[in-house]
Amino acid sequence: MPAPPVGVVGLGQLGGSLAAALVAAGRPVQGWDVDAAARDAAAARGVEITRALSGVVVLAVPLPAMATALDGLTVDPGATVTDLGSVKRPVLETVGATAGSRFVGGHPMCGTERSGHAAVDPDLFSGARWAVCLEPDTELPRWLRVAEVALDAGAAVVPTTAAEHDDAVAAISHVPHLLAAALAAAAGQAGPLALALAAGSFRDGTRVIGSDPGFVRAMVTGNAGPTAAALARVQEQLARPWTDLVADGHAVATRQHGRRDVRVPLERAALLALGRAGGAITRRRAAFVEGWVPDQA
């Protein structure tokens, strides 16, 4: 049975890169963007530019625009709707409330500080983790359709719930943006000499705050509770003796684990257990999925 088409709403860095990756994988791809230049760039890559979308419809727009992203577009009533937003609970409460059981939340863990259609990269998702949310009322066939989009783009799928996703990304994505902002602001206060001497560690530590400030604000405020809790844990760590902190942080950052291949049945509890164990799905089979979990031995 042929894979359904994918309709991408928003053809900037994430949406445009997804559309380009899927075209390269042989998927039929439709797309729309309010920016004519983004539409033209996507069309040149083989995307059918249209307001009529079907199959799996992907919302690749900023978080504040999610609720109205489909306004003015014609979406097939049977289409599955997903998104690429960096926070999941607010999108579930808005888009999910409108789309109902047709909605499956998603979030690819990739991207750069760049934005817009000029930053499109068909290889952006290659090897990335892509969270695909599996709520109690999620229809498994729709979840699989979204997972297959992620796999076709080159990503590995991590089953999770919206709440668990938001708690996790607060620690490994949203707080790092705030820390990068704090580091850059503190270095600015240290004066021109400090900035002139800044090299690799400062560059690496501040890279993500080069992102669009509006994007960062929407992300951290949209996930304010988990982000505040994760930031409090960081502040507790900074209050520890520095020698202990350095040793423990180094141990986490340099830890090495192998991977153990697994087969998981297409059942909600088993899929979520895989995600909670730190594993990912790499291939869809008829009655199960294949992937891996970290080998803790």
Image: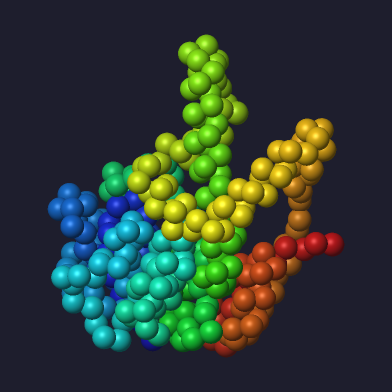
Q: Residue furthest right?
A: 297
Of the pair 196 and 149, the residue shown nearer to us: 196
Relative depth, front residue between 254 and 67: 67
Is residue 113 placed above or below 280 in the rendered structure? Answer: above
Q: Residue at x 67, y 64 (%)?
A: 278
Residue 91 at what x, y percent from top left? 40, 68
Q: Position of residue 132 (x, y in %)?
A: 50, 70
Q: Is residue 147 above or below residue 23?
A: below
Task: Check the image and report above or below for 256 versus 107.
Answer: above
Residue 115 visible, this angle: yes
Res 225 quadrant in image: bottom right
Q: Is residue 1 left or right of residue 195?
A: left
Spot occupied by residue 164 in the image (x, y as percentages of width and height):
58, 68
Question: What residue is drawn where x is 23% and y is 74%?
Answer: 53
Q: Position of residue 66 (x, y in %)?
A: 32, 64
Q: Quadrant of residue 157?
A: bottom right
